Image (tube, rainbow, N blue to C red):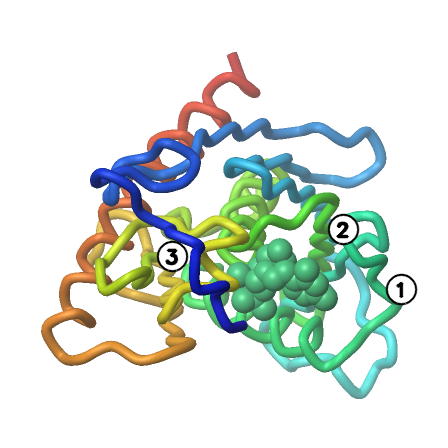
Amino acid sequence: MKKPDDMKLIVKGKRLDGRKLDEIRPVKIEAGVLGRAIGSAYVEVGGTKVIAGVHGPRGVYPKYLEKQGRAILRVKYSMAPFSVNDRKRPGPDRRSVELSKMIKHALEPVIFFDEFPQLSIDLFVEVIQADAGTRAASIVAASVALADAGIPMRALVSSCAAGKIEGKIVLDLDGPEDNYGQADLPVAVIDGTEEISLLQLDGELNEKELKEAVQLAVSGCRVIHDKQKEALRRRYQ
Ligand code: UDP
């Protein structure tokens, strides 16, 4: 989206919401927020609010999707009609299909699928308010919901975006920054490793900027990861 000429996203080294360039928005995570799902989590990153719920492991329908000797993960990301300024048309669209796939790929490397042959782990993520970074918040919520459901995993997955606005690399873009910025780079990291399970780039970065942005996003993932662990500890205290 083209930025109005008189609009400044950085003023005296601070962003429009008062954050420093390398500062993440306030993060709130709660595990076990739903009574009917086997595992669930609520995540708030600034104005972005998502809720994730898990069903299963359970039988796979339709049956042809069943995998011999291992479970499958099915992910459905959706945005509530009231989550954005212009009412979002309910139901799946190309973007939600793509994001469901990205979330699935980001989480699959940590799940021990062999423990539940022929079953399905079904994960639903609902965006109830969107202010950029919904895929990152979805991965964060999904990871906590899976842990809350007792799904065996080798680690949690954390996620955060970095990006470029007015020529500067910044952490965790909000809505106006995402709309009027030059690049958005969501990253997901498998905790305790250097492994990145999601890296997308919307916009343009040169090699130096890309390295800087990945490093910054990874540092955001560490902050998120501590909050994920705290949420799970609180749940089981
Ligand atoms: N957005 C919107 N309407 C839509 C889709 C997206 O207003 O139908 C906004 C929303 O704030 C979202 C942002 O655009 O968070 C950026 O969307 P993007 O596809 O880049 O994914 P995200 O950053 O949410 O992972």
**Dot 1 lies on which element?**
loop
> Along the polypeptide, which appears first: circle 2 or circle 1?
2
Is 105 drawn above or below residue 236 in the view shown?
Answer: below
Determine which residue is flagged by label 2: 55
Q: Can you tell which mark lies on residue 90? A: 1
> Along the polypeptide, which appears first: circle 3 or circle 2?
2
Q: Residues within 10 Å of mark 1 (few under 14, many from 20)?
A: few
- Please tell me which residue lies in front, 16 or 7: 7
Is 150 drawn above or below residue 29 in the view shown?
Answer: below
Judge left or right: residue 236 versus residue 88: left
Judge left or right: residue 187 versus residue 106: left
Residue at 51 percent of width and 12 percent of height: 237
**Dot 3 lies on which element?**
strand
Circle 2/circle 1 CB separation < 8 Å: no
Residue at 65 percent of width and 50 percent of height: 130
The yes-or-no answer for disc 3 within 8 Å of ligand 1 is yes
**Dot 2 lies on which element?**
strand
Of the residues shown, which amino acid type is indicated by label 2? Answer: His
Is 237 drawn above or below residue 74 in the view shown?
Answer: above
Residue 215, position as x, y percentages in the image: 18, 57
- Please tell me which residue lies in front, 120 or 187: 187
Q: Which quadrant of the figure shows ligand 1?
A: bottom right
Residue 121 seen in this snapshot: no
Of the residues shown, which amino acid type is indicated by label 3? Answer: Ala
Determine which residue is flagged by label 3: 161
- Please tell me which residue lies in front, 150 or 168: 168
| CA distance separating discs 2 and 1 | 22 Å
Circle 3/circle 2 CB separation < 8 Å: no
Give the mark toward the camera: 2 or 1. 1
